[in-house]
Amino acid sequence: MKKLLCTFFLISFSVFSYAKDLPDFTELVEKQGPAVVNVSITQTVNQEEMLPQMPNIPEGDPFFDFFRRFRPPHGGIPHEFESKSQGSGFIVSADGYILTNAHVVDGADEVTVRLTDKREFKAKVIGTDRRTDVALIKIEATGLPKVVVGNPSQLKVGEWVAAIGSPFGFENSVTAGIVSAKGRSLPQENYVPFIQTDAAINPGNSGGPLFNLRGEVVGINSQIYSRTGGYMGVAFAIPIDVAMDVADQLRIHGKISRGWLGVMIQEVTRELAESFGLKKTEGALIAGVEKGGPADKGGLAPSDVILRFDGKPVGNASELPLLVGATKPGKQVEVQVWRKGSARNLALVVGETPTEKVAQRPGKMESAAGRLGLGLNDLSEAQKKELQIPNGVVVVEAQALAARAGIQRGDVITAVNNSDVKSVEQFNQVLTGYKAGQNIALLVRRGERALFIPFKMR
């Protein structure tokens, strides 16, 4: 009996000690929770415009009936209706400036902010930056509770973090986890070194804060990786220093200014490193240089491997856009490249990223297609034969709006509304006929399937 009691006390003591080591978030939530807000969006959707257009197919073609089934009879649905959605945000100044995600307020006709004390305010969108998915909005109020901004560079992998937001509309929900990784580069994002966490993030958490144990905001919860649309243990947050820099530029200048080189880059594989005589698989390989751009003027050329930029090492291709984008346009920098078996240093002046231009990898990222976040290439004759289609363009990069709409690399775009797509050049010419706010539908071939994907032009 004595032995049994001893064992019981030992187990109890172990459980108690383990519980003592777990973090307590109650004080954090009490102090910082009031600065977290619910963001509700209302927008008017034209149902008729959002429906896919009939492609240019003869009425006798078997596919004519297939595509016609997607469209209900005329008059069967209202032309316009109000669409509502929700997200999260947090107050960064006592006079009403609030940070959230750009995709939360994108296309909104009306933005409503609700505080934890149940007060509601109509918010003005000061500006958005789709490349980092950051938005700055403002409500007319004073003396508001605000978050404490931390330093994400001091975060350590394995450190505890907490998220507060409105998943599925459940306001001020708190979840916790650890930092799984730092500096993550995602396929469609070029300017954000994401913080990866395993804190439970779900739809509605977007735009909410990620806190460290000191109660400081270290990130904005932005994305999840999921096969179901819900939480699967992999979430990503925008570092707060990146977000605050964007917010300051939007507030002061009304736009974002980023450095630009004018190069298309790709990863240096082991095989490429060996062929170029590099001892390590490092750097960013230049696949193309835009004529007249900063890189071209500075002497960079295709097949150069950028090893260092402005004194900072370039470990892989995904790091270069971050370094360049964070550089002030007009600054002269030194770039170390590997060329023909040896390293050399070049000096160049960083340019400013043109409007709606995104960091490029091989593929034609023209200005009109760039409005949708698309990088495209013409189909070769061999590809057309293999796919058994006469025309189309292949997607080599899907970013921003295109990625959020569901466009994927490898998709083949065969039509815009009822206009066939024959080349990248012609695709861009077709897009220039549409103004911002107009809806279009892209006919996409994906494997053996064909589907329409609607877009609102930006």
Image (cartoon, grey):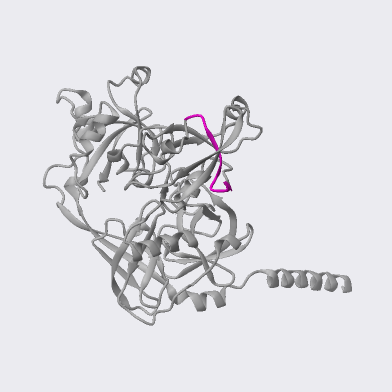
Q: Residue placed at 54% from the left, 75% from the top?
A: 28
Q: Is residue 305 left or right of residue 220?
A: right
- Residue 226 visible in rendering: no
Toward the viewer: 23 or 150? 150
The residue at the far right in this view is: 2
Please determine whether, in this image, residue 99 is positioned above or below residue 421: below
Res 2 quadrant in image: bottom right
Please determine whether, in this image, residue 15 is positioned above or below residue 222: below
Res 243 quadrant in image: bottom left
Stretch of the chain drawn in magenta: 302-312
Toward the viewer: 153 or 80? 153
Q: Position of residue 172 (x, y in %)?
A: 44, 70
- Residue 74 visible in rendering: yes
Toward the viewer: 423 or 274? 274
Q: Is residue 323 left or right of residue 380?
A: right
Toward the viewer: 344 or 267? 344
Please determine whether, in this image, residue 412 is positioned above or below residue 371: above
Q: Position of residue 208 (x, y in %)?
A: 44, 64
Q: Residue placed at 37% from the left, 47% from the top?
A: 353
Q: Is residue 384 left or right of residue 10?
A: left
| Magenta-span inclusion, residue 402 | no
Q: Is residue 350 left or right of residue 159?
A: left
Q: Position of residue 390 (x, y in %)?
A: 27, 20
